Amino acid sequence: DSGVTQTPKHLITATGQRVTLRCSPRSGDLSVYWYQQSLDQGLQFLIQYYNGEERAKGNILERFSAQQFPDLHSELNLSSLELGDSALYFCASSGEAGVRNEQFFGPGTRLTVL
Amino acid sequence: GENVEQHPSTLSVQEGDSAVIKCTYSDSASNYFPWYKQELGKRPQLIIDIRSNVGEKKDQRIAVTLNKTAKHFSLHITETQPEDSAVYFCAASNRGTGRRALTFGSGTRLQVQP
């Protein structure tokens, strides 16, 4: 167990819908990262938040957005869903003070868009 | 941005043999190189990492080497066991910036035959 939690574990929805994925980082970690893992694209970085503020953006679509709340949990919002959005979505957390910058991954949310 | 290439995409070895997975990166500013192991449907788990001021690091049967000049790094697993079978990902990031998002290689599926 990495200490990072994600809910829900599975999500099945229809095209055009909107969903919210939730992540709670390890205790004390200020950074949250979101990654998308699909069969043909591998693990792709979407977005990073640090202590409530957006720190970096990767290959995140405009239909997707995220935020980090004062208690440091984060939510990833996916809207106008398409079939191609079906993937495993992982969040990871890290502390900024550590030398090694380890990122610990949560168990993931498997999103299926029908 | 950073680009990480990983080879081979699949690797089959006999139990007890060694396995080597190689990665190259493009951004000379990258200075942190973790390796993750991912079992089917599970989260990526950090197995070893190396920073750019170190050329080699070993942890029991696992070792990682880094050649900064050539921008290569490799994972070596000795005395492989069936439980080593999984997908392995290399990654790179720049700890010097506040961003630190990981850029992943495309993964290597390792199969250890008993």
Image: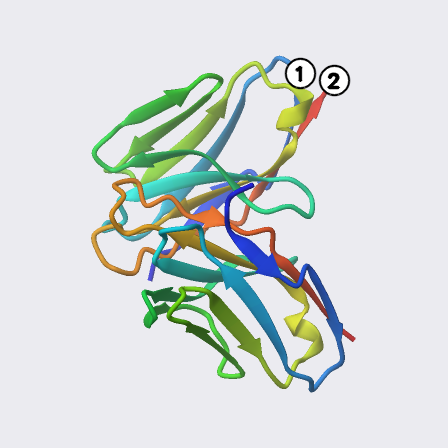
- Crowd rating for badge 1 (residues with CA inside 10 Å; few <14, some 14–19, many 20+): some
Whole-number angstrom distance, CA of label 1 to CA of label 2: 5 Å
Residue A41 visible, this angle: no
Of residues B42 and B32, the one drawn nearer to the viewer in this rendering: B42
Q: Residue at x 51, y 51 (%)?
A: A4
Q: Position of residue B97 (x, y in %)?
A: 22, 57
- Crowd rating for badge 2 (residues with CA inside 10 Å; few <14, some 14–19, many 20+): few
Find disc 1 in the rendering and name its residue.
B15
Position above or below: A103 against A67: above
* Picture quadrant where residue B79 is located: top right
Q: Residue at x 67, y 16 (%)?
A: B15
Q: Give the secondary structure at mark 2.
A: loop
Q: Position of residue A10 (x, y in %)?
A: 71, 62
Of residues B68 and B92, the one drawn nearer to the viewer in this rendering: B92
Q: Position of residue A46 (x, y in %)?
A: 46, 67
Tag 2: amino acid: Pro
Q: Residue at x 36, y 53 (%)?
A: A29
Q: Residue at x 42, y 53 (%)?
A: A93
Question: Are dots 1 and 2 on a single chain?
Answer: yes
Q: Are marks 1 and 2 in contact (CB under 8 Å)?
A: yes
Query: Which of the labelled discs sits on residue B59, or is there none?
Result: none
Q: Is residue A88 left or right of residue B75?
A: right
Tag 1: amino acid: Glu
Quadrant, the N terminus of chain B: bottom left
Of residues A102 and B90, the one drawn nearer to the viewer in this rendering: A102
Instruction: Name the subunit of mark 1.
Output: B
Q: Is residue A98 left or right of residue A102?
A: left
Query: Which of the labelled discs sits on residue B114, or is there none?
Result: 2
Q: Is residue A86 left or right of residue A77?
A: right
Q: Give the secondary structure at mark 1.
A: loop
Instruction: Name the subunit of mark 2.
Output: B
Quadrant, the C terminus of chain B: top right
